[in-house]
Image: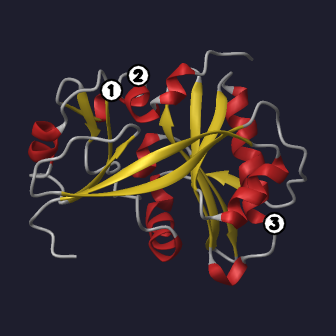
């Protein structure tokens, strides 16, 4: 598969104008995911984002613009976080020795309990509906997951790779990433992911599995004046 990677230059916008258009709150040249799904937004055409940000702050007091630096209202705060966008072009050669299942709504509480323990920051009550989630159970306990988040017709983001602290070191994350990559390729789509540039452990793991760094990407945390922290 060889697709133009241009949609990945503005992945939130690309997702909200493609596969996730129904989850979009549309302010014209600024768009956000509905807060029930994820706290991310994006813009195009060097648009003045301040009006849309002020409007969106009625729904959330902390949220992100992903991509170029936004213009914010005077009383708002802006904090920059830097991530790496990574992509893989081939299936992963890693043995899957655990039973991996595709999670559904009957697994919802187990998923949310695990995520709240190890990956709470960006995961909202409907994030799991943005794509497929895969998990490993041990003794009736969900111990590891990996899922899909941003999507276009040609690209799917792997997200929420999480392992229970009592079950690390078993290779579950590697198996789930291997499985998720395979499932995405089976749909004739290209997997990619995002990781904070300071998370050296996961970055090393992703590179070992075959991901390469495509670009740096900026996450601009916007905090409304109503927020004290």
Residue under label 3: 171
Secondary structure at numbered mark 2: loop
| Residue 21: mark in rendering | 1
Distance between the Cα atoms at labels 3 and 2? 34 Å
Q: State if disc 1 and disc 3 touch (CB < 8 Å).
A: no
Residue 153 in sight from this viewpoint: no
Residue under label 2: 18
Q: Please state if 148 lies on the left or on the right of 123 as rendered.
A: right
Secondary structure at numbered mark 1: helix
**Image x and y of residue 99, in percent:** 77, 58
**Image x and y of residue 169, in percent:** 79, 75
**Image x and y of residue 226, in percent:** 9, 66
Instruction: Looking at the image, tell me whether mark 3 or mark 2 is earlier in sequence order.
Output: 2
Residue 72 in sight from this viewpoint: yes
Up-down relation of residue 168 to residue 151 (above or below) = below
Mark 1 is surrounded, within 10 Å at the Cα level, by few (under 14), some (14 to 19) or many (20 or more) other residues, namely some
Up-down relation of residue 78 to residue 180 (above or below) = below
In front: 118, or 144?
118
Q: Which residue extends farthest bottom?
A: 166
Q: Residue at x 75, y 52 (%)?
A: 206
Q: Residue at x 89, y 50 (%)?
A: 94
In front: 81, or 179?
81
Q: State if disc 2 and disc 1 touch (CB < 8 Å).
A: yes
Q: Quadrant of the C terminus?
A: bottom left
- Is the image coloured rainbow, by chain, by secondary structure, or in one colour? secondary structure
In front: 167, or 71?
71
Secondary structure at numbered mark 3: loop
Q: Quadrant of the N terminus?
A: top right
Mark 3 is surrounded, within 10 Å at the Cα level, by few (under 14), some (14 to 19) or many (20 or more) other residues, namely some
């Amino acid at each position: 598969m060889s697709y133009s990677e241009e949609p990945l230059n503005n992945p939130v916008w690309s997702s909200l104008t493609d596969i996730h258009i129904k989850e979009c709150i549309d302010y014209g040249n600024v768009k956000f995911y509905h807060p029930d799904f994820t706290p991310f937004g994006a813009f195009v055409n060097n648009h003045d984002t301040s009006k849309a940000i002020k409007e969106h702050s009625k729904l959330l007091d902390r949220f992100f613009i992903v991509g170029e630096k936004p213009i914010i209202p005077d009383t708002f705060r802006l904090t920059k976080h830097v991530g790496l966008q990574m992509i893989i072009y081939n299936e992963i050669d890693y043995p899957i020795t655990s039973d991996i299942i595709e999670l559904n709504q009957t697994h919802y509480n187990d998923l949310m309990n695990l995520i709240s323990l190890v990956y709470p920051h960006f995961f909202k009550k409907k994030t799991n509906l943005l794509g497929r989630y895969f998990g490993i159970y041990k003794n009736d306990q969900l111990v590891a997951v990996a899922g899909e988040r941003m999507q276009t017709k040609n690209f799917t983001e792997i997200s929420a790779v999480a392992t229970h602290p009592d079950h690390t070191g078993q290779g579950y994350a590697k198996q789930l990433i291997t499985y998720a990559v395979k499932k995405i390729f089976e749909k004739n789509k290209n997997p990619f992911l995002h990781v904070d540039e300071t998370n050296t452990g996961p970055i090393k793991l992703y590179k070992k599995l075959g991901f390469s760094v495509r670009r740096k990407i900026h996450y601009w945390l916007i905090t409304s004046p109503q927020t004290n922290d």
